[in-house]
Amino acid sequence: MQTLTTLNLASNAIGDEGVQHLTKILENNNTLTTLNLAKNGIDAKGAEHLAKALEGNKTLITLNLSSNEIGTEGAQHLAKALENNNTLTELDLANNNIYNEGTQHLAKALETNNTLTALNLARNEIGAEGIEQLTSFLRNNTTLVTLNLKHNKLEVDGVKHLAVGLENNNTLHKLDLTRNQIGDQGAQDLATAFRDNKTLAYLGLDGNKIKQQGAQHLAAAFENNKTLTFLDLAGNEIGDQGAQDLAAAFRNNTTLTTLDLRRNEIGKVSKHHVMQTLRENTTLKLFLWDDVEDLD
């Protein structure tokens, strides 16, 4: 069918054999732009078939391979395809056991790629070693707009590498680092990287063991920022003072539209102080109260 533009085969257990048949179609197809193969039991062999098809394909823009089993070897096959592909803009490889080695292969390939705008590597057990290779890619890249690294193992060393790569990056709009255990030092490194940033609009830092000191650094970095619209700090440990520092920083900020501070060990009295501080900021949607009982 030469008019098909979107094909969703998610959750169909097609496996490697199914992918092999599919790639024969992709090699000759010039209309398909979106392909969803999430949750299909595809491993490295299937990724290899797909990679070969991608090398010659000139139309596919979005590829979703999330929640498969491509592993490090599969990531290496896809990386090779990305070196020669000039059309793919969105790649979702979340939950694929890629680990550090697979991330290194992808990062190296992407250094010469000028089309990818969105990359999802969530839930891949990626640590500092894998992120370090991404640094040079991010430092020089001018196309990537969205990077999802949630639920990995960046921790302090990984986010330090990431911060270096992002310091002079002028294209990234959305960065999700949810649940990476970056702590106060990681928050400080990010704050330094984004202090003069004029492109980042979304920063997800939910569940990262950030305390008062980290919140203070972030508050100072974003106080006069004119691009950040969404900041998620839920599930951290910023406490009363951290919450008040952030509230003071965003009191007169008219760019930020969403601030999530739920589950942060903030007392009721401090929550009321935060609300009072931000009462005149009519553009900001504040998430502060953890549950209905909090409001009693």
Image: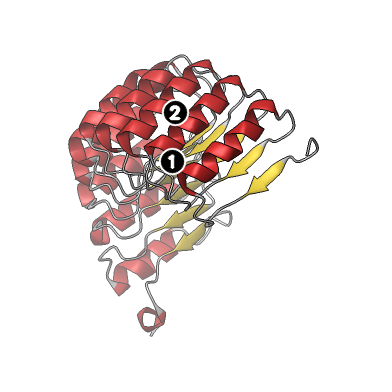
Q: Residue at x 36, y 27 (%)?
A: 76
Residue at which label 2 appears = 78
Tell me the quadrant of the picture where the C terminus can be found.
Answer: bottom left
Q: Residue at x 21, y 46 (%)?
A: 183
Q: Residue at x 39, y 40 (%)?
A: 121
| Residue lying farthest to the right in this orientation | 3
Who comes first in sequence, dot 2 or dot 1? Answer: 2
* Amino acid at circle 1: Leu
Image-based side of 72 in relation to 115, left or right = left
Residue at which label 1 appears = 93
Mark 2 neighbour class, 10 Å CA radius: few under 14, some 14 to 19, many 20 or more? many
**Does the rendering let one see residue 22?**
yes
As drawn, 205 above or below 81: below
Q: Residue 48 sits in which quadrant? A: top left
Mark 2 secondary-structure assignment = helix
Mark 1 secondary-structure assignment = loop
Q: Residue at x 21, y 41 (%)?
A: 155
Image-based side of 219 in relation to 50, left or right = left
**Does the rendering let one see residue 167?**
no
In the foreground, 247 or 135: 135
As drawn, 94 above or below 258: above
Kindly indicate whether the residue at mark 1 contacts the one at mark 2 (C-beta within 8 angstroms): yes
